[in-house]
Amino acid sequence: MIRTAVLVAFLAALVFSGLMGGEAVAEVIAGSKLLADCRDGDNPNARDSTYKWGTCFGYINGVADALVPAQLYCLPKGASAGQVLDVAKLYIQDHPDKQYLPAPQLIVNALVEKFPCN
């Protein structure tokens, strides 16, 4: 089931990459790259911080939104995109041994752990 979720996340990343301006390049990034973009996005003094923050926010929430129908996790009513962002960033940060894995897989792992379906 997790493999199916990662495949769906990959397909979602392909779709969302086409919605960005400029040349569309489908890329599934590693957790370490996503975390670096998120950290740069949180630092207003970093070069391209607004772009990096948007990449972080959009990537994490795009994967999360695309996988809601798979029912791998159950977001509580009223959960915000900011909460999803924080949960995923914290999970990736707290699991440096897994940061080489594809970011969509880590996002799913974070949401399954934090918001299990009972």
Image (cartoon, rainbow, N blue to C red):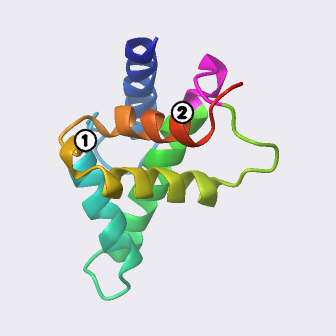
Q: Is residue 97 above or below residue 16?
A: below
Quadrant where the image shows the C terminus: top right
Position of 1 compared to 65: left or right?
left
User: Picture quarter containing residue 30?
Assistant: top left
Secondary-structure class at tag 2: helix
**Residue behind mark 2:** 112
Please give the name of the residue rendered at 27% of the width and 82% of the height, measured from the top-left corner: 46
The residue carrying pointer 1 sits among few (fewer than 14), some (14 to 19) or many (20 or more) residues within 10 Å by Cα, namely: some
Position of 66 compared to 30: left or right?
right
Outermost residue, front direction?
A: 118
Please give the name of the residue rendered at 68% of the width and 26% of the height, measured from the top-left corner: 117
Please tell me which residue lies in front, 46 or 102. 102
The residue carrying pointer 2 sits among few (fewer than 14), some (14 to 19) or many (20 or more) residues within 10 Å by Cα, namely: some
Mark 2 vs 1: CB contact within 8 A: no
- Residue 90 in percent (x, y) is at 43, 58
Position of 30 compared to 80: left or right?
left
Whichever of labels 2 and 1 marks the residue nearer the N terminus, that label is 1
Disc 2 from disc 1: Cα separation: 20 Å
Residue 67 belongs to the span the image colors magenta? yes
Please give the name of the residue rendered at 27% of the width and 46% of the height, measured from the top-left corner: 31
Using the image, tell me which numbered label, if any, was put on residue 29.
Answer: 1
Position of 40 compared to 54: left or right?
left
- Residue 59 in percent (x, y) is at 43, 46
Please tell me which residue lies in front, 52 or 106. 106
Amino acid residing under circle 1? Ile
Count the marks: 2
Please give the name of the residue rendered at 43% of the width and 40% of the height, measured from the top-left corner: 107
Q: Is residue 58 above or below residue 69?
A: below
Magenta segment: 66-73
Outermost residue, bottom direction?
A: 45
Amino acid residing under circle 2? Val
- Residue 114 in percent (x, y) is at 57, 43
